[in-house]
Amino acid sequence: SQPPFPPLPEGVVVEEVSVIKFTVVVTISAEVNDIDVTELEASFRPAQQCFEPECQLTVTLQPVEQSAARGALQAAGTVASSTASVFKDGNTLSAVRNANYVFARNSATQAGNILNQPVSEVDPNVNEREDTEPRAVAPPPPSAPPTPPPPSS
């Protein structure tokens, strides 16, 4: 369930809008606690061409499952998923789509440079799906009356 919206400005309504979500996934050779998700989000944003208000970015971090078979040799790791959620009819959709597919073709080293993190793996697949999500939508501004000339001093 979505968190409730903060109090909205006058006239702004929350509407379910159609969005396309693009998720890219990288594995980072670091503990979850050592990764600053705000910084990571700031790096993913230009990489995915996801800029508000057209596009909203969500970055989630999960520790890599330590499998018993791999034993203690497997270094600590974090799977970072970054989802760009862009208006389906927005004019940034193609830019966001392209950026995500370009990002997914990066090598781990390239992605590490982009994200400023020790990336060990980039998932070459982009998860692209259609969805709806609530967005605060402002009504078009009323046409402003002409500004009176400033009083002459």
Image: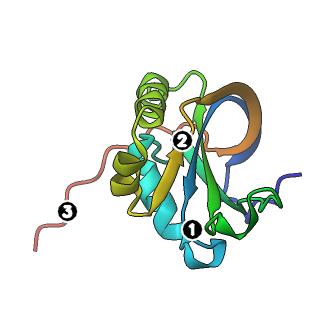
Q: Mark 2 Cα within 10 Å, few/some/many (few <14, many 20+)?
A: many
Query: Residue 102 vs residue 97: left or right?
Result: left
The amino acid type of the residue labelled 2 equals Cys
| Residue pointed to by mark 1 | 37
Q: CA distance from mark 1 to mark 2?
A: 18 Å
Lower position in the chain sequence, tag 3 or tag 1: 1
Q: Which numbered disc covers residue 150?
A: 3
Q: Are marks 3 and 1 in contact (CB under 8 Å)?
A: no
Q: Position of residue 124 (x, y in %)?
A: 53, 32
Lower position in the chain sequence, tag 2 or tag 3: 2
The amino acid type of the residue labelled 1 equals Val
Q: Is residue 85 visible?
A: yes
- Residue depicted at x 54% and y 36%: 140
- Secondary structure of residue under mark 1: helix
Position above or below: 18 against 150: above
Position above or below: 110 against 100: below
Asked which colour scheme the image uses, the reply is rainbow
Q: Position of residue 1 (x, y in %)?
A: 89, 51
- Tell which of 74 and 91 is nearer to you: 74
Q: Mark 3 Cα within 10 Å, few/some/many (few <14, many 20+)?
A: few
| Residue pointed to by mark 2 | 55
Q: Locate the C terminus and report the quarter of the image it occupies.
A: bottom left
Query: Residue 123 vs residue 10: left or right?
Result: left
Position above or below: 45 against 32: above
Q: Mark 1 Cα within 10 Å, few/some/many (few <14, many 20+)?
A: some
